[in-house]
Image (cartoon, grey):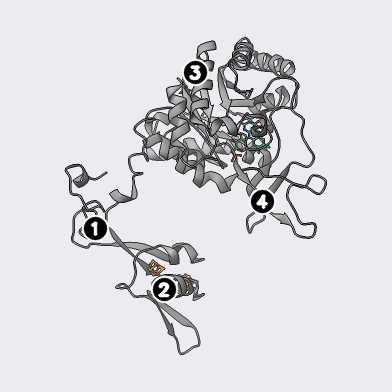
């Protein structure tokens, strides 16, 4: 059986599944139950200076898929609404009872040296394994000069990371906000400031929808609303992309990453790890389905690793990074075309409509004597865009097949059709 244990920046954990800083990690009662269920670690709900934050009612809203499952989740909560003293006492007790689990403490205080110095020293006394700096909260806190307001300014990220490293011996993880044009800048700043790792993503600014009867966005607080933080399965592609940007940026390559964003099952976790993440954090899936989802996550990941011959997480961590490149290095001589399996086709015509109306008119509609239609790919017109395969409702009915164009690898920097082509030694290498 595969070994799921990890050592993330010196923090040991029996498996890579941690609960992200949020309501599931808000108090000892929740965290104890999470550990009993099998979670490898937690990042405690963000602590701040007293007086504790005060929340509104209501707080959450959601987007649903066609099966009625939550695909996107939105919240307008702030950091912990419990006092610092109560949280610190509980953190110390939980760490003592669960020495083999990772217990990282999330922090957010004003961007002042004394404030950070005081709180990191308080947290260190609890015996917690590490710190996560919350520079990502998109609502409520930025108005007070904290959270995303800091995370959007690389100089502040660097400065705060440096203070934390200066005033404690614990590993420091900088949690990044995705509400920024280029995620590499705050990641580089975190590294410059001496951070041991980055975690991403925090939530994305969002309005999930409008109540059109009352003309107010959701969630509604006495007839008014405000933008919230978006998370859940819908944000996973954004989080994966940002993770890959940091993993392959020459300036941050090798910087440990804790992957967060829409992770709901073992496969999501394996995807983040393949892009370089050393551990993963989960929030929405635990809030919607409960702590026991970790059982399936652990067995699913271990079974998959066994089937691939991976004995440890390190055996496959980062394997997808070298295959994630810039567009200009993709092979212009690689060609695929769509192929329809006639035996599986139910004649719905969705592939035809998509290709005919919005793509390349590469599917022929052939009316049959019995009133049904047959669909055939016109290979010379097909550009291999995948649209018909994506829209086809029947599994494996449309497959994309490779055609040999008889030409070797050639990327855009070498392509004669590129007016700015510059053939250099470097450009002739497969990237
Ligand atoms: C209700 C709620 C409260 C949250 N509170 C915090 C917080 O206090 N500190 C923090 O760093 N992130 C907070 N987050 C963000 C999560 O830790 C996580 O980064 C985000 O939800 C993406 O993960 P997910 O898609 O698994 O939910 C919160 C998220 C939710 C839904
Ligand atoms: S792959 Fe694209 S171009 Fe080819 S048949 Fe399908 S939709 Fe049309
Ligand atoms: S979408 Fe799929 S099932 Fe429908 S006509 Fe096209 S190939 Fe057949």
Report how far apart the C-alphas of labels 2 and 3 lie in the structure: 63 Å
The part of the image, by quadrant, that contains residue 31 is top right
Q: Does the residue at mark 2 contact the one at mark 3 (Cβ under 8 Å)?
A: no
Q: Which mark is residue 342?
A: 2
Dot 4 falls on a residue whose secondary structure is loop
- Residue 402 falls left or right of residue 174: left
Is the N terminus in the top left, top right, bottom left or bottom right quadrant? top left
> Marks 1/4: CA distance?
43 Å
Give the secondary structure at mark 1: loop
Give the quadrant of ligand 1: top right
Q: Mark 3 points at which residue?
A: 162
Distance between mark 1 and mark 2 Cα atoms? 42 Å
Q: Decide: marks 2, 4 in contact (CB < 8 A)? A: no
**Gap between marks 1 and 3 measured at Cα:** 46 Å
Question: Which residue corresponds to the image point at 56% horizontal and 20% vertical from the top-left?
Answer: 131
Residue beneath the point at 36% across and 44% down? 324
Image quadrant where residue 241 sits: top left
Which of discs 2 and 3 lies nearer the camera? The answer is 3
- First in sequence: mark 2 vs mark 4: 4
Mark 1–mark 3 CB contact (< 8 Å): no
């Amino acid at each position: 059986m595969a070994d799921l244990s990890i050592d993330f920046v010196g923090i040991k954990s029996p498996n890579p599944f941690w609960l992200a800083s949020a309501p599931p990690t808000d108090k000892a009662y929740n965290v104890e139950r999470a550990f009993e269920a099998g979670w490898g670690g937690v990042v405690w709900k963000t602590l701040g200076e007293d007086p504790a934050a005060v929340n509104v009612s209501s707080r959450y809203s959601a987007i649903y898929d066609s099966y009625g499952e939550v695909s996107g989740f939105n919240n307008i909560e702030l950091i912990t609404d419990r006092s610092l003293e109560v949280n610190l006492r509980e953190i110390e007790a939980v760490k003592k009872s669960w020495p083999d689990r990772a217990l990282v403490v999330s922090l957010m205080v004003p961007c002042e040296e004394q404030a950070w110095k005081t709180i990191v020293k308080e947290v260190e006394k609890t015996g917690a394994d590490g710190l996560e700096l919350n520079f990502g909260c998109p609502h409520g806190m930025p108005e007070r000069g904290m959270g995303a307001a800091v995370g959007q300014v690389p100089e502040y990220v660097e400065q705060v990371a440096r203070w934390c490293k200066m005033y404690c011996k614990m590993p420091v993880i900088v949690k990044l906000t995705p509400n920024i044009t280029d995620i590499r800048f705050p990641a580089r700043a975190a590294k410059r400031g001496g951070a041991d790792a980055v975690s991403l993503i925090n939530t994305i600014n969002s309005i999930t929808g409008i109540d059109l009867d009352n003309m107010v966005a959701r969630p509604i607080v006495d007839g008014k609303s405000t933008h919230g933080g978006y998370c859940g399965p819908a944000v996973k592609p954004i989080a994966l992309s940002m993770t890959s940007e940091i993993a392959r940026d020459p300036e941050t390559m090798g910087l440990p990453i804790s992957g967060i964003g829409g992770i709901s099952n073992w496969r999501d976790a394996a995807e983040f790890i393949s892009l370089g993440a050393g551990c993963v954090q989960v929030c929405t899936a635990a809030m919607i389905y409960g702590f026991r989802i970790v059982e399936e996550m652990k067995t699913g990941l271990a079974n998959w690793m066994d089937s691939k011959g991976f004995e440890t997480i390190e055996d496959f961590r980062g394997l997808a990074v070298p295959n994630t490149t810039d567009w200009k290095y993709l092979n212009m001589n690689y060609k695929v075309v769509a192929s329809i399996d006639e035996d599986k086709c139910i004649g719905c015509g969705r592939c035809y409509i998509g290709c005919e109306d919005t793509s390349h008119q590469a599917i022929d509609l052939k009316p049959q004597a019995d009133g049904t239609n047959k669909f055939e790919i016109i290979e010379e017109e097909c550009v291999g865009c995948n649209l018909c395969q994506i829209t086809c409702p029947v599994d494996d009915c449309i497959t994309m097949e490779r055609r040999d164009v008889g030409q070797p690898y050639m990327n855009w920097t070498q392509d004669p059709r590129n007016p700015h082509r510059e053939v250099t030694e470097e450009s002739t290498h497969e990237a």
